[in-house]
Image (tube, rainbow, N blue to C red):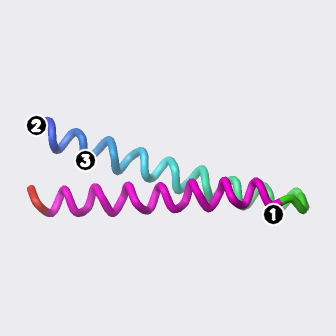
Amino acid sequence: MDLPARRNDTVRAFGTVSLVAGFLTTLLTMSSGYEGLEPHILAAFLILTGLGLRIEAAIADRRM
């Protein structure tokens, strides 16, 4: 496996982990009844980061 392909796999995996962490943060916050805004901001940041990384990996993979 060449270096760009490994990089794409790493970026895609990190994006997936970030998405899962964001959704879990949202679910745990909703189920606990916490009224603060901070966990939702963190979850949104994680989800947007995960989406961006997945899109970046897809674009880079398409160029290969």
The location of residue 6, given as percent across then percent down, is 21, 39
Q: Distance from label 1 to label 2 (Cα)?
A: 42 Å
Q: Which amino acid is tagged 1?
A: Met
The location of residue 5, given as percent across then percent down, is 17, 44
The residue at the point 55 percent across, 60 percent down is 47
| Mark 1 or mark 2: whose residue is earlier in sequence | 2
Decide: is 59 above or below 8.
Answer: below
Left or right for 7, reference 13: left
Q: Distance from label 3 to label 2 (Cα)?
A: 10 Å
- The reply to whether the C-beta atoms of the residues labelled 1 and 3 are less than 8 Å apart is no
Q: Main secondary structure of the magenta part?
A: helix
The residue at the point 45 percent across, 52 percent down is 16
The residue at the point 32 percent across, 41 percent down is 10
The secondary structure type at the circle numbered 2 is: loop
Left or right for 17, reference 53: right
Q: Quadrant of the N terminus?
A: top left
Q: How would you rate the neighbour count of disc 2 (Cα within 10 Å): few for under 14, some for 14-19, many for 20 or more?
A: few
- The reply to whether the C-beta atoms of the residues labelled 1 and 2 are less than 8 Å apart is no
- Numbered label attached to residue 30: 1
Q: Which residues are magenta?
A: 37-62
Q: Which amino acid is tagged 2?
A: Asp
| Mark 1 or mark 3: whose residue is earlier in sequence | 3
Q: Nearer the viewer, residue 62 or 36?
A: 36
Left or right for 39, reference 15: right
Q: Which amino acid is tagged 3?
A: Asn
Would you name the residue on which mark 3 appears? 8
The residue at the point 10 percent across, 37 percent down is 2
- Numbered label attached to residue 2: 2
